[in-house]
Image: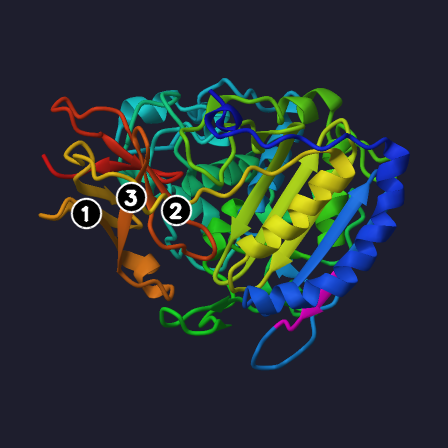
Amino acid sequence: MSQETQQSGTPAPPVPSREEARARLDTLKEWLDARLEPLLEENEVPGAAVAVCVGDKVIDAAAGVLSTETKVEATTDSVFQIGSVTKVWTATLAMQLVDEGVLDLDAPVRTYLPDFELADDKAAATVTTQHLMSHTAGFEGDFMTDTGLSDDCLEKFVATFGTIPQLFPPGERFSYNNAAYCLMGRLVEVLRGQPYDVCLRRYLCEPLGLTHTATGPYEALMYRAAVGHVRHEPGAPPRPAAIWATVRSNAAAGSLLAMRPRDLLAFARMHLADGVAPDGTRVLSAESARAMREPHVDLPYLGFMGDHWALGWETFDLPGGTVVGHDGGTVGQGAFLRVVPGRDVAVALQINGGDPLGLYVEIVGRVLRDLAGIELRPLPKPDPDAPRIDASRYVGTYTATAGDTVVSQDADGRIWVERRPKGVFAQLDRQAERVELLPDREGTLIAAVPEMGIHRLFTFVGDDGAGRARFLHTGRADRRADA
């Protein structure tokens, strides 16, 4: 069941004609120029840039500053990190290899990387590139091992996968997996015989004619580059993060790639045109571009996230039509990309800290409504009068490499969650926190207070054989640790 049918339906607006949508871009540009700066202030976002297109007609806008320390103003040519939106680029590089007959999505990864290992050898022998693309590989995915800055850093990183635990057999369910995309980046390197960032530039950036895109910090310095901002203490205003980016070994999953919104839209427009770049260059076959948008796995109810995952893209069944997209978050930077196939509409929103959801709802919501006749679903909100429930199925400790999550219920029947970051995640300005949870629907609890503008959902799936949830799902499936 899609999340659209799970929630009370919001009526879809009328779908404008292509000519009407193009004409509305001018009005949208005036609105962005007037409204973007106040939106930043309302949501404590230091700086942002946005670009919108209907076909080949593109508008953009920017406001705020790239750093609250330097006060350098954000412009439409400023580059922001796109974070995990990079994953769609990595999937596109892999699909180009499919077009060339070099890569078979259904063949085991070991066909191309014979030395590939996981803690579970059976899983390592059967996991395929399709599993990697759709986040169904089943192994834990949040690793940021620093293997240096040299061109062999990704090769070295993948060589450490032999200790990664398996959560479930490949193909069984969805669990967002950064490491899987790093592995796919390594596949691209091996089959191309070139480092990942060279492949990005040669097979995507250059054919797309991108002029303000950086595959790493050394290139980003050539442009007006945004700095990420984080809240160093709860309730404090966003301040520049201690680092600009994380490790190069995670570049294929989204640790480094930065660009201006217009460049990100050029990539989106290529996908809207079924593989043809804005200047007419064929970058990807029409068959592969369409295959990347076809749902491959259903997602559990996760609120802000989509309904399905395809081959790289996330898909949303919204009132009025289907939208594909991807979000990205790095150290204090964020990106939202939404694409409406068949209606030639796309929007890229990039920010450098604060609470981005307010901007997303107003800007992306207006774009989809006015230009594509599609309405966003309301963000999930808790019911403060929800009755107390027996949470024994949910109570326990759930573990992952990034941290442990403890769900408890006190003597008054109130439910609490405490997240305790571990390793590198404990060093990235993240602190342990304890939040009350309220019942939302069967199998799902919702945070009583918002975080970065959204009330997080905690969905419990599977069974441990004793009537308790096997996984706590927040996009990642964290396994139960207590016996």
Amino acid type at image mark 1 = Arg
- Residue 119 location (% of width, % of height): 26, 33
- Residue 294 location (% of width, % of height): 60, 22
Vertical order, 51 against 73 (above or below) = above
Q: In which quarter of the image is residue 340?
A: top right
Q: What element carries label 2?
A: loop
Q: Nearer the viewer, residue 127 or 64?
A: 64
- Residue at the disc numbered 1: 414
Residue 133 visible in the picture? yes
Q: What stretch is highlighted in magenta?
A: 61-66
Q: In this view, does 370 lie to the left or right of 256?
A: right
Which mark is in front, 1 or 2?
1
- Residue 458 location (% of width, % of height): 33, 40
Q: In which quarter of the image is residue 372?
A: top right
Q: Is mark 1 on a helix, strand or loop?
A: loop
Majority SS type along the magenta span: strand
Residue 195 visible in the picture? no
Q: Does the magenta stretch include residue 62?
A: yes
Which mark is in front, 3 or 2?
3
Amino acid type at image mark 3 = Leu
Q: Which of 59 and 360 is in front in this view?
A: 360
**Which mark is first along the chain, 2 or 1?**
1
State the mark number for residue 456. Answer: 2
Image quadrant in which the C terminus is located: top left
Q: Quadrant of residue 131?
A: top left
The residue at 54%/60% (across/down) is: 333
Amino acid type at image mark 2 = Arg
The residue at 76%/44% (across/down) is: 266
Vertical order, 183 against 424 (above or below) = above
**Which mark is first along the chain, 3 or 1?**
1
Vertical order, 222 against 25 (above or below) = below
